[in-house]
Image (cartoon, grey):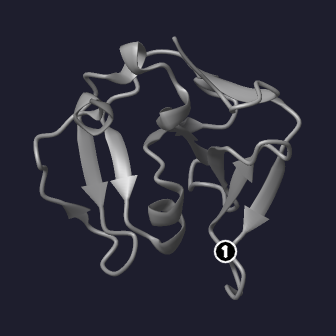
Amino acid sequence: MLEGTCHCGQAGWTLVGDPGSVTACNCTLCRRYGALWAYDYEGGRIAVHGVTKSYRRIGKQDPALEMVFCPDCACVLYWRGLRLEPDGRRRMAVNLRLADLAGVADLKIDHFDGLDSFDDLPSQGRCVRDLWA
């Protein structure tokens, strides 16, 4: 199980099981937040706790997700899909930058072009440890 908490400790998440590879996205939000995402579904392997606030992209008629953060220290905790998947589940992703390095150091980083093409980008062979060393 992985755990992540905001800087002030008032909010956080847990992820049960293998998170798989981590995604670094270059969209206008993720690039600014510097987040590394691990995915699952609401009511699935991810549990969240604490008081939070959310942000939906300004200027978008029908935003696909909301970013959820701590209202006290402003750490981005996770994102939550605003549309249900075809199977009725709601996708979400936790920000692994809020976890202890020991638990995530060896996870491979995948890159996603959320800015232009919405395609997975070629692997650079890096893991989380490479970013935090």
Q: On screen, 127 above or below 71?
A: above
Comparing 108 with 46, the one in front is 108
At x 82% / y 27%, what residue is drawn? 10
Please give the residue where the numbered disc 1 appears in the rendered image.
63
How many numbered callouts?
1
- Tell me: residue 24, above or below residue 131: below
Q: Position of residue 120 (x, y in %)?
A: 24, 60
The kind of secondary structure element at disc 1 is: loop
Image coordinates for residue 58, horizontal then vertical, percent: 72, 81
Residue 34 sits above or below residue 18 on the image: below
The quarter of the rendered structure image containing the C terminus is top left
Hey, what amino acid is under mark 1?
Answer: Pro
* 99 relative to 133 in the view: left or right: right
Q: Position of residue 70 (x, y in %)?
A: 78, 42
Horizontally, is 10 left or right of 33 in the view?
right
Query: Residue at image x 48%, y 34%?
Result: 96
The picture places residue 76, in percent across and down from the top left corner, at 65, 47
Q: Is residue 96 visible?
A: yes
Which residue lies most toward the front here?
133
Q: Residue at x 89, y 36 (%)?
A: 51
Seen from this angle, which residue lies furthest right?
51
The answer to whether one can see residue 47 in this image is: no
Residue 86, above or below 19: below
In which quarter of the view is residue 56 placed? bottom right
Along the line of sight, the residue nearer the viewer: 45 or 55: 55
Quarter of the rendering containing residue 5: top right
Residue drawn at the location 68% of the way across and 74% of the way down: 57
Is 31 or 16 nearer to us in this picture? 31
Q: Residues within 10 Å of mark 1 (few under 14, many from 20)?
A: few
